[in-house]
Image (tube, rainbow, N blue to C red):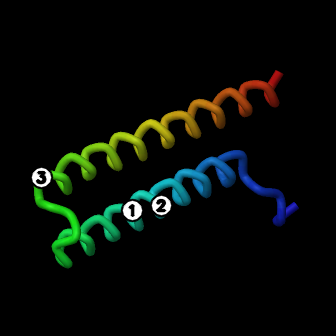
């Protein structure tokens, strides 16, 4: 019984994975900014897009998780 996963384990793990990819993308963008591969204006535009994309994916994962949980209950 101790090895039974909690219902939120998959959801929180997936959200952590989304956050990890967002942090890696932002770190890559920051590195390109420091190396002057991309201009500052492009960095701010890409930064906003990466953050919004991460939020969209996180909300979609959360909604799917909630739908799956409600399907199991009844």
**On the picture, is 43 further left or further right than 16?**
left
Residue 39, horizontal then vertical, whole percent: 14, 61
Q: Position of residue 54 (x, y in %)?
A: 42, 46
Q: Is residue 9 above or below residue 60?
A: below
How far from the left and from the top, in percent, is residue 42?
18, 52
The residue located at (63%, 47%) in the rendering is 11
Which element type, helix, strand or loop, lies under badge 2? helix
For marks 1 and 3, the one nearer the N-term is 1
Please tell me whether mark 2 or mark 3 is closer to you in this view: 3
Residue 25's label in the rendered image is: 1
Image height of 44 relative to 61, above or below: below
Percent x, y for residue 68? 73, 32
Dot 1: few (<14), some (14–19), or many (≥20) neighbours within 10 Å?
Answer: some
**Residue assigned mark 2:** 21
Quickly name the residue at label 3: 41
Q: Residue furthest bottom?
A: 35
């Amino acid at each position: 019984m101790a090895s039974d996963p909690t219902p939120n384990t998959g959801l929180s793990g997936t959200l952590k994975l989304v956050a990890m990819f967002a942090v890696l993308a932002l770190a890559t963008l920051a590195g390109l900014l420091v190396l002057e591969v991309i201009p500052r204006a492009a960095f701010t535009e890409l930064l906003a897009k990466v953050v919004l994309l991460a939020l969209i994916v996180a909300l979609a994962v959360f909604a799917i998780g909630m739908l799956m949980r409600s399907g199991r209950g009844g």
